[in-house]
Image: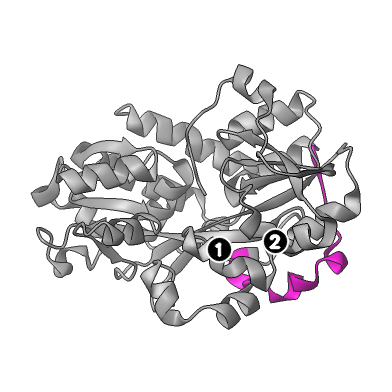
């Protein structure tokens, strides 16, 4: 789900919508692709049509659009953006009593304090980030540790995501931190220095899974920090790929979900109906088929086997897991600024 392709302000103003029956009582601001009716079939069954969708290219674009006055009802963002949206005053808390699956959400994805006592973010989908590698040229022992990114043997044939959250999740894990919500200044500096040390070994920073799959399929890249969706896609194509989620230091989970926008013109109850549909048992398999795990842990375990999860890169693992939970906005901005400097060689 963590797409990074950017749409221009002009194109977003056109507000592309899904070519199907639409319920005008709910406007969902989302990444293109999440209008798939299979993800919210329970909403269609209840109301006779999908919500109306408007699309953005990345979350900075979405944030600026909403700040400028665009009135949607709910927006689909990833956890790293939540504090920024909360601090800006453009979202309001959810009433969790209207979300029956709330108590069944995976506790690794909700954390202990999302929104300072109020719940501003409902996680609905998640994925893993770990080491993707070419097993024909990279032995398993070399990816048993995150130090592989420092290994001179693979210099010039490695890549990281051009995504500050994923990059710092890797760096924190590599420097012994598996909960970034409590990271100290010293731990932040250690993680930043680790990224600086790794930077010269990289061929590039990849921007989307299709680009990464091409780089790995061509042999240009042998080792990457990658989202789980790359793994089953390349397996299906018969391409050589391993996905190491259990290096000694651990791996990461990213998560995305919905926020309730202030000033929405739709029917509030339908926002809850949509969230409940996304978290329903009926949505689990369609989401997994696209590479996403459902945040509803009870529904997920009732609908799919552990073998299915492993095949999608989402199985249970026995190493530290850094969940990319919301961060204070000041820390995330600090990470973003530092990451840009590191990519520029500073």
Q: Is residue 308 left or right of residue 18?
A: left
Where residue 90 sits, quadrant-wise, is top right
Crowding near pointer 2: few (<14 within 10 Å), some, many (20+)? many
Q: CA distance from mark 2 to mark 1?
A: 10 Å
State the residue at coordinates (68%, 27%).
64
| Quadrant holding the C terminus | top left
Contact check, label 2 and label 1, Cβ < 8 Å = yes
Residue 41 is labelled as 2
Residue 117 visible in this rendered orientation of the protein: no
State the residue at coordinates (35%, 33%).
342
Q: How many marks?
A: 2
Q: Is 106 contained in the magenta span?
A: yes
Q: Indicate whether 16 appears above or below 38.
A: above
Q: Secondary structure at mark 1?
A: helix
Q: Is residue 11 left or right of residue 96?
A: left
Q: Indicate whether 176 appears above or below 342.
A: below
Chosen colour scheme = one colour
Give how far across and how far down residue 265 sits, in percent.
89, 37
Where residue 181 sits, quadrant-wise, is bottom right
Q: Earlier in the sequence, mark 2 or mark 1?
A: 2
Q: Is 195 contained in the magenta span?
A: no
- Report which residue position mark 1 lands on: 286
Give how far across and how far down residue 89 sits, in percent.
80, 38
State the residue at coordinates (30%, 61%).
236
Crowding near pointer 1: few (<14 within 10 Å), some, many (20+)? some
State the residue at coordinates (19%, 41%).
201
Residue 253 is labelled as none
Residues drawn in magenta: 90-109
Q: Indicate whether 88 appears above or below 170.
A: above
Q: Is residue 5 left or right of residue 281?
A: left
């Amino acid at each position: 789900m963590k797409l990074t392709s950017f749409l221009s302000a002009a194109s977003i103003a056109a507000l592309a919508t899904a070519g199907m029956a639409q319920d005008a009582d709910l406007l969902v601001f989302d990444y293109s692709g999440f209008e798939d009716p299979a993800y919210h079939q329970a909403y269609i069954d209840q109301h006779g049509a999908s919500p109306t969708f408007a699309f953005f290219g990345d979350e900075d674009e979405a944030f600026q659009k909403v700040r400028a006055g665009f009135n949607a009802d709910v927006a689909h963002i990833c956890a790293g953006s939540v504090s920024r949206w909360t601090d800006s005053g453009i979202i309001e808390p959810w009433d969790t009593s209207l979300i029956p699956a709330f108590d069944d959400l995976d506790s690794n994805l909700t954390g202990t304090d999302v929104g300072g006592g109020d719940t501003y973010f409902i996680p609905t989908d998640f994925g893993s980030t770990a080491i993707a590698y070419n097993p024909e040229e990279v032995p398993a022992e070399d990816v048993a540790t995150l130090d592989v990114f420092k290994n001179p043997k693979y210099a010039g044939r490695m890549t990281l995501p051009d995504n500050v959250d994923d990059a710092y999740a890797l760096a924190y894990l590599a420097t012994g931190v598996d909960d970034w919500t409590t990271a100290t200044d010293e731990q932040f500096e250690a993680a930043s220095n680790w990224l600086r040390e790794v930077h010269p070994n990289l061929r590039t920073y990849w921007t989307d899974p299709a680009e990464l799959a091409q780089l790995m399929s061509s042999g240009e890249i042998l080792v990457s920090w990658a989202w789980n969706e790359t793994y089953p896609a390349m397996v299906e194509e018969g391409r050589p790929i391993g996905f190491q989620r259990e290096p000694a230091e651990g791996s990461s989970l990213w998560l995305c979900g919905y926020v309730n926008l202030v000033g929405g013109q739709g029917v509030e109850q339908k926002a809850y109906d949509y969230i409940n549909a996304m978290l329903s048992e009926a949505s689990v398999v369609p989401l997994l088929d696209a590479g996403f795990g459902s945040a509803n842990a009870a529904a997920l375990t009732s609908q799919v086997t552990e073998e299915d999860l492993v095949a999608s890169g989402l199985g249970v693992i026995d190493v530290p897991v850094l969940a990319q939970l919301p961060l204070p906005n000041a820390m995330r901005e600090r990470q973003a600024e530092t990451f840009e400097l590191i990519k520029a060689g500073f």
